[in-house]
Amino acid sequence: MSKELNDLIASELEQVAEVVEEVPTSLLNSQLVVYNDDFNTFDWVIQCFMEVCSHTFEQSEQLSLIVHYKGKAIVKTGKMEKLKPMKDALVERGLSAVIDQMVTRR
């Protein structure tokens, strides 16, 4: 992989914190996790994140890079009843997605 591509990826990953909204952890109890695979294209994963999770193109692109290079990414957090239809929709589109329970702080 070229140095330019590595630098671009590192830059994109650093910007993730600036793009994704922060939500108080006391309001969350589940997280939607997507795992990397060897058959879905970046374009398809980005499109799925935009359509299913209502992410911007930039958020979707950055999340797809995290999934690819880290092996997985938390793509959405919230209540189980909100995340379950999203997980099902991502799985129907061929992505590997699960919902993990989070321990909520009180």
Image (spheres, helix red, strand yellow):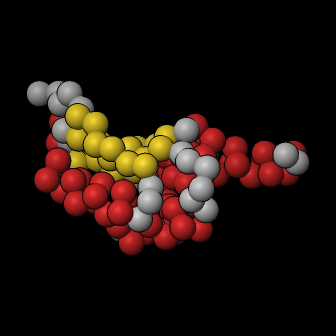
Outermost residue toward the right? 2
Q: Position of residue 64 (x, y in %)?
A: 55, 54
Seen at 52% across and 62% down, the residue is: 45
Q: Position of residue 38 (x, y in %)?
A: 61, 50
Q: Is residue 5 left or right of residue 83?
A: right
| Residue 42, quarter of the rendered image | bottom right
Considering the image in quadrants, where does the C terminus appear?
Answer: top left
Q: Relative to 95, say whether 33 is above or below.
A: above
Q: Position of residue 14 (x, y in %)?
A: 61, 44
| Residue 33, quarter of the rendered image | top left
Seen at 28% across and 36% down, the residue is: 100
Most foreground residue, 101 or 25: 101
Q: Relative to 104, say whether 22 is above or below.
A: below
Q: Relative to 58, say whether 95 is above or below.
A: above
Q: Is residue 33 left or right of residue 12?
A: left
Q: Is residue 101 left or right of residue 92?
A: left
Q: Position of residue 34 (x, y in %)?
A: 43, 47
